[in-house]
Image (cartoon, helix red, strand yellow):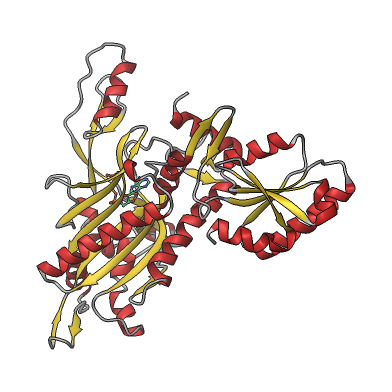
Amino acid sequence: MTVQEKIVSLCKRRGFIYPGSEIYGGLAGTWDYGPLGVELKNNIKRFFWQSMVYERDNIVGLDSAILMNPQVWKASGHVQAFVDPLVECKICHERFRADQIEEKKVHQKLHQGAKISWTAPKEFNLLVEAKLGVVEDAKQKVYLRGEITQGVHINFKNILDSTRLTIPFGVAQIGKAFRNEITPGNFTFRSREFEQMELQYYIKPENKEVQKWNEYWKKERMNWYFSLGMNNKRLRFRKHTDSERAHYAQDAWDIEYDSPFGWKEFEGIHNRGNWDLGQHQKYSGVDMSFFDQEINKKYNPYIIETSGGVDRAAFFFLIDAYCEEKDRVILKLHPKLAPVKIAVFPLLGNKPDLIKKAKGIYNDLKSKISALVAWDDRGNIGKRYFSQDEIGTPFCITIDFQSLKDNTVTIRNRDTTKQDRVKIDDLHRILQTRLKL
Ligand code: ATP
């Protein structure tokens, strides 16, 4: 089994990620996050919000609607230009993105040596359409948003009018986006429904400002992944070539991860210039300018965007954390990301005194730590440790016979397997420090 296959299997078996609509045969490109997956994803989103909104003075949050007036997508250029080049295998008519060289090579092998020819690339629009309204003939065509970005830009005036922000300032948003991807695949990497976490940062329309903030956000975002424990040798920046840059971007950099299927993008840092505000001004007729009191002048600000995928980040954090050691599998997730923070075990599951004492500690920790705390009293203790290692639980607390005598417990560290004994009275404080909560 490859590492990727092992992770996919672990995700299903332990409740991180399930294939979408599985009992009906599935729906390609959709995934459901199970009890552990939802924790991992929420943790990623929480720390994104923490670092973007709570720790800064000039960035605010937004939660805009998924459904928007279709004019938004005409103005943003997505109706015309949000396209991928589609080619079709002339033997079996399976469709691929023309630039997905690897996938096409794999497909070639399926035809066992037969020479494949491909149709000429056709432009294929990725926006997912839906119909809205109650009268069948008068239903309005709408789009499920293809990126969460536009919800921010159409609210530029509202945000300015309802806050005291002044340039430079940013708006952070997390939410679902939908794309009719030609070839969803590589687990959650390319899905048709996924979540993005973004910052739109409005700046003065000057070259030196663009350079400054572009470099600043590149560094900040890369450091954010390091701060959550991602291996810095497996991360890099890649600049987009002129031909691959999206229609709205003047400059584009990807943060890429060295995944089992090659170096792949999971966050983009883009200079969107004044494309978005300019287009919405043109299509809506609403003035989208900012009056800069410093220079007594109005202008359409430029935008530096950081746009990351929550699902891709979750997948890459899992790959990065996956580790096999002798007879155990460990997810060495940063404690901040680990779905279960602590597991509590009575040494034996059939001793009422031990169970009573352990339940007291378990309930106390559950009430103090706002994250999952697990309980396990089944089978032998070694197996219980291994079971927690496999889902990345950083610490296991064991209540043994000595605990009954002197009010101490052991804390076992997931990565080193070392145990130390601490007083129950100090347990919560010690765990908080070790968990970096
Ligand atoms: P790709 O080149 O892989 O299709 P993109 O350049 O179109 O990605 P952006 O439009 O820049 O991606 O979107 C920003 C982020 O949203 C990406 O870096 C990625 O993490 C996430 N993302 C985009 N498309 C998908 C998808 N189909 N499935 C999961 N995440 C996605």
Q: Is residue 49 above or below residue 400?
A: below
Residue 276 falls in image quadrant: bottom left
Residue nearer the viewer, 220 or 116: 220
Q: Viewed as shown, does residue 160 lie left or right of 135?
A: left
Pinpoint residue 431: horizontal percent, then vertical percent. 62, 58
Pinpoint residue 279: horizontal percent, then vertical percent. 18, 67
Q: Is residue 420 visible?
A: yes
Residue at left offset 58%, top offset 31%:
328
* Quadrant holding the C terminus: bottom right
Q: Is residue 331 above or below residue 429?
A: above
Residue nearer the viewer, 68 or 147: 147
Pinpoint residue 132: horizontal percent, then vertical percent. 41, 60
Q: Is residue 130 visible?
A: no
Tally of marks: 0
Residue at left offset 19%, top offset 84%:
291
Residue at left offset 30%, top offset 40%:
264
Q: Is residue 101 above or below residue 345?
A: above
Residue nearer the viewer, 433 or 124: 433
Pinpoint residue 85: horizontal percent, then vertical percent. 21, 39
Q: Viewed as shown, does residue 434 lie left or right of 346?
A: left
Q: Viewed as shown, does residue 316 lie left or right of 408?
A: left
- Residue farthest top in this picture: 113
